[in-house]
Structure formats: structure tokens, C-alpha cells
């Protein structure tokens, strides 16, 4: 079942790719309908630097607003936390902070 988190923020993929440890699981992207050999089929969309992805409250990155769907990046390391805080300026508003988020 889809889970909508308390907070997420969209960023262009080109900005997320600036993180030195970035590795995307593009096969987890959202599916789109596309005509292939005269038939409409669902295929995973190709991600470009102009596409927006969502940094979730738990610092995973998804291709959509749902916390547990289409996860593109889930390697939440101290370096990624630092990048989110200092480069992306991503911060969950204090009243929405997740209880499972580790303190720094």
C-alpha cells in the first residue's frame, strides 16, 4: 500500500547527481504508457537531469510523492545527510520531524 509521508521536497535530478556518492536505481522509476510496435505498454520512464525527484523525510529519494514507492536512492549515509542539509538545504519542519530520524 502506498504511504504518504509527512514531508518531502522535489529537486531536479541534475542537482541530486552532484552528490559524490549518488547511485540511482532508475529501474524503480515510475511507469509510463508508451506505444511499442503498435501496442500500448507500461515501461519505466527514462530519467533525465531535468526530471524532479523527491527527497523524503527519511532522506530516501523517490520518483513520486509516496514514501515507499519508486525508490531511486536509499543509501542514507552521514555524507548524504550532510549533502541534504548543507547543499540542498533540505530540512523537515520541526513540527513534522519523523520520530525514526536519527539525531546528528
Image (cartoon, rainbow, N blue to C red):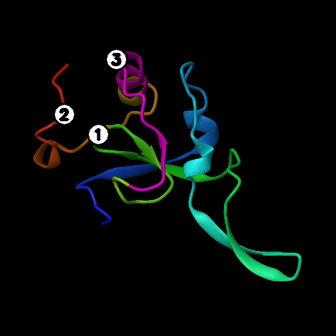
Q: Give the label on residue 88, or none.
A: none
Q: Tell me, yes or no, whether the two marked residues, 2 and 1, touch with CB atoms within 8 Å.
A: yes
Q: In whole angstroms, how far apart are the C-alphas of marks 3 and 1? A: 13 Å
Extreme residue in the right direction: 37
* Rendered-image quadrant of the C terminus: top left
Helix or strand or loop: what does disc 3 sit on? helix
User: Which residue position holds label 2?
Assistant: 101
Rendering quarter of residue 85: top left
Q: Residue at x 22, y 55 (%)?
A: 6
Q: Residue at x 16, y 43 (%)?
A: 98
Q: Is residue 32 above or below residue 29?
A: below
User: Which residue position holds label 3?
Assistant: 78
Q: Which region is colored magenta?
A: 69-83
Instruction: Looking at the image, tell me whether mark 2 or mark 1 is earlier in sequence order.
Output: 1
* Circle count: 3
Q: In whole angstroms, how far apart are the C-alphas of marks 2 and 1? A: 6 Å
Rendering quarter of residue 66: bottom left
User: Which residue position holds label 1?
Assistant: 58
Instruction: Looking at the image, tell me whether mark 3 or mark 2 is earlier in sequence order.
Output: 3
Q: Position of residue 101 (x, y in %)?
A: 18, 33
Amino acid at each position: 500500500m502506498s504511504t504518504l509521508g509527512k514531508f518531502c521536497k522535489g529537486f531536479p535530478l541534475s542537482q541530486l547527481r552532484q552528490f559524490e556518492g549518488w547511485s540511482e536505481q532508475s529501474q524503480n522509476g515510475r511507469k509510463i504508457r508508451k506505444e511499442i510496435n503498435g501496442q500500448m505498454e507500461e515501461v519505466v520512464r527514462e530519467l533525465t537531469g531535468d526530471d524532479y525527484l523527491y527527497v523524503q523525510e527519511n532522506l530516501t529519494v523517490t520518483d513520486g510523492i509516496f514514501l515507499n514507492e519508486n525508490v531511486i536512492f536509499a543509501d542514507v549515509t552521514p555524507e548524504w545527510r550532510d549533502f541534504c542539509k548543507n547543499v540542498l538545504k533540505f530540512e523537515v519542519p520541526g513540527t513534522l520531524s519523523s520520530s525514526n530520524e536519527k539525531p546528528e
